[in-house]
Amino acid sequence: MKQPSYNQKYHKVVDVKTTPGRVYGKVVNRLLRFDLPFVVMVKDSVNDHDLQEWDKQFKQGNDITVKSAYTPTSVHVQESPVYIPTEFIEPYSVVTSIGIVKIGFLRRNNPELPLKLHHEFYGSVSKALSFTTVYVEFDDIYTSLPLNSDDDNEGNNTDILVDGAMEALNKFLVIYKIINEKHYIPQLTTYGIGKYQFLDVDENDNSLITQVLKHYGTPVSFEDTHDYQTELFLRNGLLDNHEFATYIRIYQDVWYKITTHDWRMAVADSLILFESWIRPYLHKIYTEKGLSKNAIKNKFKVNGNPMFITDIAAILVEDATGYAFQDSREYADLLNKAIKVRNKVIHLEKYDVQQIEARGCFYSVCNAISAIAVNGGNILRGKPDVTYLPTFDYDSELFYSKDSGKAN
């Protein structure tokens, strides 16, 4: 049987309603739908039947019988405020780790605004003014895992499909942001979106709608706010007029890249994190020892050339603190899990970075910083600007995260 075109599938799936008690056959097409908190300014690939019908009833002055999450609960303008596309393009084909998927977009305006706004607002990522619905299609021809909802691995496959959709979206966004200079758009995570809707089509052209909620870890009740000591630390920090150290910001940035599955950039930035901490740290120690600025500057040079980060870790740490960091496990991990991996990525010897490599690189940097600060920082002990990072156990459940995927 000839497969219908992509747009025909979209329209059919969006229009149909699930029939109670119907027996469904083998799933041959799965459509995943979710909302972004910003607008993607490409032409639309799909129409929303319910929204189109609402617009028609409103313009004809009829009683409105159609309601959805995208229709207004009340109208404050004389003309219809909803956006109905009039021109469509084919969706984008994206190669992912689970095969080729197709991704399309439908722009929307906030239906509750008291005015008609069919615009993109540069810098807006709150969904308050306008936003986009994403449609990702998986079929049984180009996707490398079973789509059938009766499969024993249904739950696992659903998770993998959601991750695959996010992989496709982030791959699209990387290119889209560069060519359109929309660098304010964030990279997105499976858990950041949170709410998904699967629309499955079986071999008999029946449809089934399934809601999926994704969250990381155990949900925390609104009653469980942070404790008194954390609250006190927060309030005292807000009264401090000093800027945070650069490495603290980079530490957060690397965590963000790991959370968004941007493994390659997490590796690259992890070494920047180490450099942004180790140089000021050693500089302070040399200053406390009475060295001049020029003498300190020369410490970081070999034959007049800047010292490599490997030599700084192996030579200068012991020179400044007396701690033989180069003999520690932390140094070996920093060299093998971070520096060597980062060099391969930066010099394009390695492109396909796995999650475990990104986390190993980041964790080894954090462990190295902590080891140096604990074992070598006695001369600065007690000073308020000396902070070391949490340590990580490579065998812990945190290290082997349940997140999946490759570099976006």
Image (tube, grey):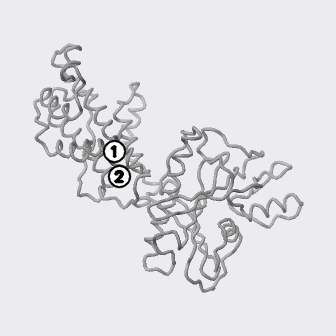
Residue situated in front as seen by the camera: 408 or 149: 408
Answer with left or right where residue 83 lies relative to residue 240: right
Q: Which residue is drawn at 69% across and 75% down?
A: 17
Q: What residue type is labelled 2?
A: Val
* Quadrant in which residue 68 is drawn: bottom right
Residue 213: numbered disc: none
Whether 84 is drawn above or below 248: the answer is below
Residue at x 70% of width, y 73% of height = 16
Per the image, the residue denoted by label 2 is 353
Tell me where residue 330 sits by quadrant: top left
Location of the N terminus by quadrant is: bottom right
The residue lying toward the viewer, choosing from 264 and 119, is: 264
User: In the rendered view, does 33 fall on the left or right side of 284?
Assistant: right
- Between 346 and 57, the residue placed more toward the observer is 346
Residue 402 in sight from this viewpoint = yes
Query: Which residue is farthest right?
Result: 61
Instruction: Label 2, secondary structure: give it.
Output: loop
On the picture, is 234 further left or further right than 181? left
Q: Is residue 229 visible?
A: no
Q: Which residue is drawn at 21% across and 41% down?
A: 368
Secondary element type, mark 1: helix
Q: Where is residue 394 in the image (x, y as percent from the top left)?
A: 24, 54
Task: Tell whether label 2 touches label 1 (CB within 8 Å).
Answer: yes
The residue identified by callout 1 is 345
> Where in the figure is residue 40, as x and y percent of width and height?
62, 48
Q: In which quarter of the image is residue 217?
A: bottom left
Badge 1 amino acid: Val
What's the distance in space between the residues labelled 1 and 2, CA to CA?
8 Å
Badge 1, how many Cα within 10 Å: few under 14, some, many 20+? some
